[in-house]
Image: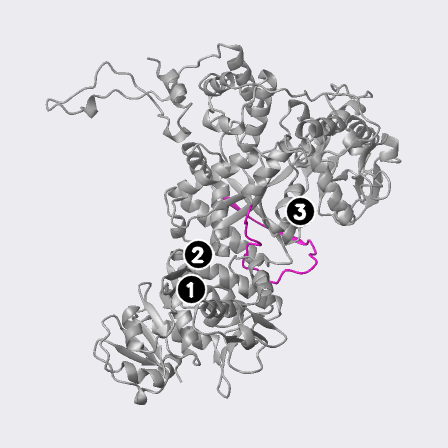
Amino acid sequence: MDPVALRAEVARFLTGYMVPDAIVVLDELPLTPNGKLDRKALPAAEFVSGAAYRAPSSPIEQAVAEVFAELLGGVEIGLDDDFFALGGNSLLATRAVARVNAALDANVAVRELFEASTVAALAGRVQAGAGRERAPLARGLRPERIPLSLVQQRMWVLNRLDPGSPAYNIPLAIRLTGALDVSALRYAVADVLERHEALRTRYPEAGAGGVPYQEILSVAEALPGGLTVEATDDPLARIGALMSTGFDVTAEVPLRAALLAVGSDAHAEEHLLAVVVHHVAADGVSMTPLARDLATAYVARIEGRSPAWAPLEVQYADFALWQRAEIGEDTDADSVAARQLAYWREQLAGLPGQQALPQDRPRPAVPSLRAGTVSTTLPVETHDALAALARARNSTLFMVVHAALAVLLARMSGGSDIAIGTAVAGRGERALDDLVGMFVNTIALRTRVDSGARFAELVEVARETDLSAFGNADVPFERVVEEVAASRGGGRDSLFQVVLSFENTEAQTLELPGLTIAGLDAGAVAAKFDMQVVVDARRGADGSTGPLHVVLNYAADLFDESTAQAFARRFERIVAAVAADPDVVVGDIDILDAEERDRALVGTGGTEAVESGGAGAALGQSLTAAVEDDPEGPAIVWGERVVTYAELDAGSSRLARVLIELGCGPGDGVAVRLDRGVDRVIAHWAVLKAGAAVARASAAAVTIGTGAAASGANALALDDPAVRVRIDEQSPRPVTYANRVRTLRGGDPVWIAAGGAPVTYDELAAAADRLARAELTFESRTYGFAPDSVATLLETVTAGANGASVVVSPDGGDPTWLLAEEWITHVFVDGRTAGGLETAELEDLRTVVFDGDRSTAPAFGEAVDVVTLPELFGR
């Protein structure tokens, strides 16, 4: 028996973490005199990492090994070498599979590399696979009008919507100190444009409102006069102007370059080279071949010759034609595009709307795209622990970080259905390695975060999500948005607002004779999303791990720098916690620092409450505690019907969003003209989420009711089908203070009664806290007989904050029978009802909340506590 071969066979049907690290062959098991296993006599295991090198023995194994070596830089790749153990990641996995398929005419999926990540195991999958007819990527005949690639199409549309926007500009800025040969550099720039057609292509339309196409220009047409050379005393301001100016890609080549001489001396020793390319012509990976080719051309030109580089196998136009032929149109049911679009329709169906992160300001109607940046660094030990977790779960570091970011967003937004965007390189074919062009696509990674699950289990959920998404990443993202989110306005931010990016690409370097070179950080040109998390996971030259650098680019329209720093600290704490214990329960991860925890303990309610000056400002969010703890727990009981906390939360969020659309918020009254029932509890929750007040006054801003009771300009008649449709169309995601029309303060009214002093949010929060101490827990069942009292709102808040059940069964006339039949533990009564309960024997009853003075309160037995509203409200 060959242990190495046995591991390879086992790995074909077991996931990675279930495959033994070592297999030891014994003639027999050593036993003690009692016939039990003698563990001390077992020989030491020899692990695979120390196993002898086994050379590939078949053409298939050799081809797989060569692909691994090419992508990972290995000199000698053996049968037992593991792609991910050697430094492979999710992006490289896509390229590896594409190259294995191309070399062997196979049809291996990305998922199979994760399931069989050694050379021997993947070669076994290739043998079992069947190739498909596919045209090779090569130069070919071009039509008169060359179409845009699929990903270029979406960039073109975005550019037409706002040609002046710098949102999709890619900057490259380099400081050159020393003896620069300006003439040689100008020639080198022209050489690079000649080599890469994409840098000298513009994208006009065929006729008014026609189809865009690629128009490839000469170098002289693309960059008239060659590289601009300017003298300036403020080079950074000039670079900023170059980078913040948009392109009209239909009329001009999407490339801008300038050489800035620092100072007025034409022979200055310091220069800044600034290159800006629009995303329609290049992606981030393109900056590496661009810099490399620029260096090659410059060295050749200072030696008085043209660069002697090998011709590119293909140009971008060839790729665009090949891609469209391979992917096809989604109108063709048999095409790759149609199959992938069907996947995204199913995968993203029912995706909630915008995930409400705690914003400092409401979202503007027209974003300014101003960006800010904060960063943090995770130590090598954390990087190593996360990598070990990835290997144990047959995943990658990207998948582990994706799971950690999903936890952060779930905890910060109060939701569990989390969508995160990410970019896929789209450069699987070997011929694209050295090509400048736009290949990257965007995909949505939808993950459901179970707060009761262990983090290691969430990594497996993220792994399955990511693998499925990577396998359907060819159809353009904007096409997915059109298909999935058209009813939400069609914007890309209707699917996700947070993006995760990994810096796995080669660093952009220039080595030029006689010059000292330093890259300049151009900063975030524009904030295309609410937040972009960029992780630098590159390894050292010797393959060793280093610290993990995490950068958060955030939209300055929405967040202050201090808020972004809080996000970074909480993400760091989550990552540190899961690195220390991968089996930690997701909901148990402590994301607060000592100061934040102290504020929470004294009842300030976190950021919102501090900002608005009272604990009551966080009252609406306190209702979600039961939703998070037990979403399937009974929130409302109506006879045999039970409404869960998840259903109550979703229904009230939808209604709250309608109230907010009507301009209803803090300081406004909402007349809830509904009988005791499910809809009334939902309405109370909705009013609190909007930050408004339940009003018994006639001057209410909005009325919620049915039939004739729902009257007025802003009336929501819940029995009106049109109103129900309007409510149902809203997002069920939790509503936070960021969604309100204005800031809620603790002193704002929450209850307005005709002729009486209003009750404030602070007062209601304090009363609910006092009442919660009266044995009101998640096992309690409440009932109220005081519909015209603030007691009915107090019942809703206290039950919701503690996970109790609100019983809304109709009053059958005999209150004693009703309370006994429904096992009521806490009853809210006024003077008219209390008398009928005074002599009743109710075994379950624990507390009576009386709307009146202590002097007029009825007397119950010793087992029942009586509290009054004046006592609870301190009045």
- Image height check: is 303 above or below 803? above
Is residue 620 or residue 261 the one in the foreground? 620
Is residue 490 or residue 757 the one in the foreground? 490
**Residue beneath label 1, please?**
600
Mark 1 secondary-structure assignment: helix
Residue 457 is marked as none
Q: Which mark's residue is nearer the viewer, 1 or 3? A: 1
Q: Distance between the residues labelled 2 and 1?
A: 9 Å
**Region rendered in magenta:** 349-378
Mark 2 secondary-structure assignment: loop
Q: Residue at x 44, y 65 (%)?
A: 622
Q: Which mark's residue is nearer the viewer, 2 or 3? A: 2
Q: Name the residue furthest left.
A: 33
**Residue beneath label 3, please?**
523
The disc labelled 1 sits on which kind of residue?
A: Ala
Q: Residues within 10 Å of mark 1 (few under 14, many from 20)?
A: some
**Location of residue 601 in the rendering, given as x and y in whole percent from the top left corner:** 39, 65
Check whether the beta carbons of the residues at disc 2 and disc 1 lie within 8 A of each other.
yes
**Residue beneath label 2, please?**
592
Is residue 79 or residue 224 the one in the foreground? 79
Q: Is 376 a magenta residue? A: yes
**Location of residue 530 in the rendering, given as x and y in whole percent from the top left corner:** 61, 52
Q: In which quarter of the image is residue 443?
A: top right
**Location of residue 39 in the rendering, given as x and y in whole percent from the top left corner:** 20, 25
Screen quadrant of the C terminus: bottom left
Q: Distance between the residues labelled 2 and 3?
A: 29 Å
